[in-house]
């Protein structure tokens, strides 16, 4: 039987809400089928499956009609993930009123399946169950079946993932939820195999038992669904007792987060292991503010282990989503734009803090990967790359030693020793490239100096990359998600400002123009996604917040006033659409969004930081630069609202803690002037290469002095006697100018 008794005092799982967690304990109901706990799996769970099955690529729906007959309703969608299921024998509906109207009319429960195109185990469940004619027949007979792309509908995903976690204590994708025709969830889990195996009940059995229980005990299902909705609503309204907005919150957070640190391999916990860039950035802020050397030591350990491990693509650049083991060797091979957009600034910060050039190299290689493989001709950034190619997880990325020997010839032995290539491989008979501890010994034996040795390894990697390009590539989800694009816009802007690389500056300019042109509607509101020129879903809070911060960073990096003006305009729109004055908090969906069972707040950071926490940080940064007090005032109120969560659940509040760091300050603007524009640009780059996360560097030009929102800040700030000059300002108050290269350096030395 189904027994889902749910506490009226149900509480939110501590911190992060999905599978990207440290060890978070959720509230568990007792939902059972014949007394067996509802099975829960993560997208990386390993079981036996047919690796020879054909991969479901984003182009499948356009090529399968002859082989598989008529498509289902998903054929009219633009989401690559939904199109992958367009020729399933399941009578899928996209999310919408049509599905729920059909459920009410036919008196059937709704089966909701949520996933995304790069998810390996989403593909597995599709091949095993959704393509299985007999299972599909049961689904069609007993349920109204709805398929959702979580990247298109994060609002739907968050609501029902919360429900799954309340019942099971865990979550992941594919997510599977059974609910009433009104959308109230009464049972759920994640991946289920088609038939019982390895202690997991089979999906076909679950369908049968859910149908039986719905027919015999519908009232109880409805009651449990209503109870679950009440519990989710309570979570959204729940608030910890407020704490003072003091730096004690930051020092306490660093202490608490480091309790989960793996001091042997970096990262947090054991396996699976996620990068958690937002927590690492918070730790770097604590190093800067308090001189917490342990915090910086751990960040460096983690970044070094990740860069050395298989989670990093040593040939093409970029990071996979997470590691399935504790040592970062075996990645879940999907690549997500949002992970790389957060990791690039983190590695740039590490370079600025330490001067270690390999951090800069990693950031640049990752950006080069994005330019090469994840950037549209118009300048926007694509969403994801699949874990699978040819139906096999990771096949595109792994190697046999014989392949490398043939391609590299005399250099093969050196390369293999450096990158852990052996005859038997290091993963399922193949090799995942990773940097070993042999580099120093191999270089010494080679007799080559550092530069020549690294150049030879680079040539080897380029040779292998060229050969890898001839393989069948993983599927790519080429939709544009605005929030993720905003993050990557910030990453390119920071890189452009620090390196002066024109490619990064051009990418910043082009991306900013593309996003303003294509994802801002005529009424000033934003769209969440765009695919094939179609925009269907209004922007969510994180779309606005990430884009506002991206435009702010881009405006400074490439000297574009239009970007800064747009950031200010969108800030007002974001406040109007998402800020709740009575609660002094941001909500995740806009005012006129479709009515769902709850309106969520999105308080805790996940793989993507919380929209609320992103909004606070974006408003504080923009308010600091422009001097618009309304922006900082609203951000401060919202920050005060979550102060209790920062104290009691810091591992889920890393982005809010960064906002707190900015609120506490002192923030500053360094205005650079001089008669030689090239010298001013060089000085600005040097200033940006210091780790000073609360500082904004503005090189004064003739046009910048006329910017609407910077006039007060840069007014009358000119070169003194034609020499390089720096004005250090906090708010609207500026120190006496630093004049001349020697004086500037002396002042900087006194600040470090």
Image: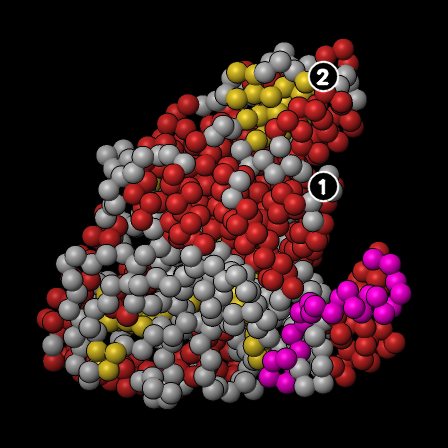
- Give whichever of 208, 192 is nearer the camera: 192
Q: In the displayed structure, would residue 727 be above or below residue 119?
A: above
Q: Residue at x 59, y 40 (%)?
A: 512
Q: Residues within 10 Å of mark 2 (few under 14, many from 20)?
A: many
Where residue 326 sits in the image (x, y, percent)? 52, 70
Tag 2, which secondary structure? strand
Residue 444 picture quarter: bottom right
In the rendered image, is residue 79 in sight?
A: no
Q: Residue at x 33, y 68 (%)?
A: 170
Where residue 34 sits in the image (x, y, percent)? 19, 84
Q: Is residue 449 highlighted in magenta? A: yes
Tag 1, which secondary structure? helix
Q: In the displayed structure, would residue 412 be above or below residue 706?
A: below
Q: Residue at x 47, y 73 (%)?
A: 44
Label 2 vs label 1, nearer the camera: 2
206 left or right of 608 in image: left
Which one is earlier in the sequence, the residue at label 2 or at label 1? Answer: 1
In the rendered image, is residue 686 in sight?
A: yes
Where residue 436 sits in the image (x, y, percent)? 69, 69
- Give whichever of 184, 595 is nearer the camera: 184
335 left or right of 419 in image: left
How far is mark 2 from mark 1, CA to CA? 24 Å
Residue under label 1, please give it. 499
Q: Is residue 464 highlighted in magenta? A: no
**Can you tell which mark lies on residue 739?**
2
Q: In the displayed structure, would residue 138 be above or below residue 298?
A: below
Q: In the displayed structure, would residue 312 be above or below residue 635?
A: below
- Give whichever of 199, 232 is nearer the camera: 199
Where residue 348 sits in the image (x, y, percent)? 63, 46
Q: Residue at x 75, y 19 (%)?
A: 740
Q: Which residues are magenta?
A: 426-450
Q: Residues within 10 Å of mark 1 (few under 14, many from 20)?
A: some
């Amino acid at each position: 039987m189904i027994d889902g008794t749910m506490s009226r005092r149900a509480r939110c799982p501590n911190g992060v809400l999905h599978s990207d967690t440290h060890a978070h304990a959720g509230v568990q109901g007792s939902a059972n089928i014949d007394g067996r706990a509802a099975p829960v799996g993560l997208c990386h769970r390993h079981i036996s499956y047919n690796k020879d099955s054909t991969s479901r690529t984003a182009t499948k729906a356009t090529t399968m009609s002859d082989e598989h007959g008529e498509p289902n309703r998903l054929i009219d969608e633009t989401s690559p993930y939904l199109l992958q299921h367009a020729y399933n024998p399941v009578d899928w509906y996209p999310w919408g009123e049509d599905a729920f109207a059909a459920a009410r009319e036919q008196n059937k429960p709704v089966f909701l399946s949520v996933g995304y195109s790069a998810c390996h185990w989403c593909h597995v469940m599709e091949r095993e169950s959704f393509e299985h004619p007999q299972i599909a027949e049961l689904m069609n007979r007993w349920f109204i079946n709805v398929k959702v792309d979580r990247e298109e509908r994060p609002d739907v995903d968050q609501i029902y993932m919360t429900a799954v976690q309340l019942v099971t204590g865990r979550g992941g994708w594919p997510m599977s939820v059974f609910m009433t025709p009104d959308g109230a969830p009464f049972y759920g889990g994640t991946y289920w195999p088609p038939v019982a195996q390895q202690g997991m009940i089979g999906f076909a059995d679950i369908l049968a038992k859910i149908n039986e229980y719905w027919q015999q005990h519908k009232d109880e299902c409805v009651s449990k669904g209503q109870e679950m909705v009440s519990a989710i609503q309570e979570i959204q309204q729940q608030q910890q007792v407020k704490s003072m907005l003091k730096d004690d919150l930051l020092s306490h957070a660093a202490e608490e987060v480091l309790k989960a640190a793996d001091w042997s391999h970096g990262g947090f916990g054991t396996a699976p292991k996620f990068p958690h860039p937002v927590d690492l950035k918070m730790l770097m802020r604590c190093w800067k503010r308090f001189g917490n050397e342990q915090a910086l030591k751990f960040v460096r350990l983690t970044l070094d282990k990740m860069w050395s491990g298989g989670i990093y693509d040593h040939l093409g650049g970029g990071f996979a989503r997470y590691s399935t083991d504790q040592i970062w060797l075996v990645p879940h091979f999907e690549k997500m734009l949002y992970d790389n957009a957060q990791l690039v600034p983190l590695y740039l910060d590490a370079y600025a803090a330490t001067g270690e050039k390999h951090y800069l190299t990693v950031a640049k290689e990752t950006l080069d990967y994005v330019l090469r493989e994840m950037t549209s001709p118009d300048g926007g950034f694509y969403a994801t790359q699949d874990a699978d190619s040819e139906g096999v997880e990771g096949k595109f990325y792994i190697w046999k030693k014989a392949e490398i020997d043939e391609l590299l010839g005399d250099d093969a032995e050196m390369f293999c020793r450096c990158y852990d290539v052996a005859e038997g491989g290091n993963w399922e008979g193949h090799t995942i490239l990773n940097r070993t501890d042999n580099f120093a010994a191999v270089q010494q034996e080679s007799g080559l100096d550092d530069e020549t040795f690294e150049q030879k390894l680079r040539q080897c990697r380029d040779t292998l990359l060229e050969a890898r390009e001839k393989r069948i590539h993983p599927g790519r989800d080429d939709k544009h998600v605005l929030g993720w694009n905003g993050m990557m816009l910030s990453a390119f802007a920071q890189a452009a400002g620090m390196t002066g690389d024109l490619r990064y500056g051009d990418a910043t300019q082009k991306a900013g123009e593309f996003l303003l042109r294509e994802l801002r509607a005529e009424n000033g509101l934003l769209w969440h996604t765009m695919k094939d020129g179609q925009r269907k879903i209004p922007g969510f809070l994180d779309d606005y917040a990430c884009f506002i911060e991206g435009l702010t960073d881009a405006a400074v990096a490439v000297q574009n006033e239009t970007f800064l003006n747009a950031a200010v305009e969108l800030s007002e729109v974001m406040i109007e659409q998402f800020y709740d004055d009575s609660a002094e908090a941001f909500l995740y969906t806009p005012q006129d969004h479709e009515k769902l069972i709850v309106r969520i707040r999105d308080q805790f950071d996940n793989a993507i930081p919380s929209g609320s926490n992103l909004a606070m940080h974006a408003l504080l940064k923009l308010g600091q630069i422009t001097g618009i007090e309304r922006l900082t005032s609203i951000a401060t109120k919202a920050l005060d609202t979550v102060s209790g969560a920062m104290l009691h659940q810091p591992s889920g509040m890393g982005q809010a803690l960064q906002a707190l760091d900015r609120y506490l300050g002192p923030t500053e603007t360094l205005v650079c002037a001089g008669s030689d524009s090239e010298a001013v640009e060089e000085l600005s780059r040097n200033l940006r290469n210091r780790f000073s996360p609360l500082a904004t560097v503005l090189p004064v030009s003739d046009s910048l002095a006329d910017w609407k929102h910077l006039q007060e800040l840069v007014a009358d700030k000119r070169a003194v006697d034609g020499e390089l000059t720096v004005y250090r300002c906090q708010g609207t108050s500026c120190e006496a100018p630093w004049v001349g290269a020697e004086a500037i350096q002396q002042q900087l030395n006194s600040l470090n």
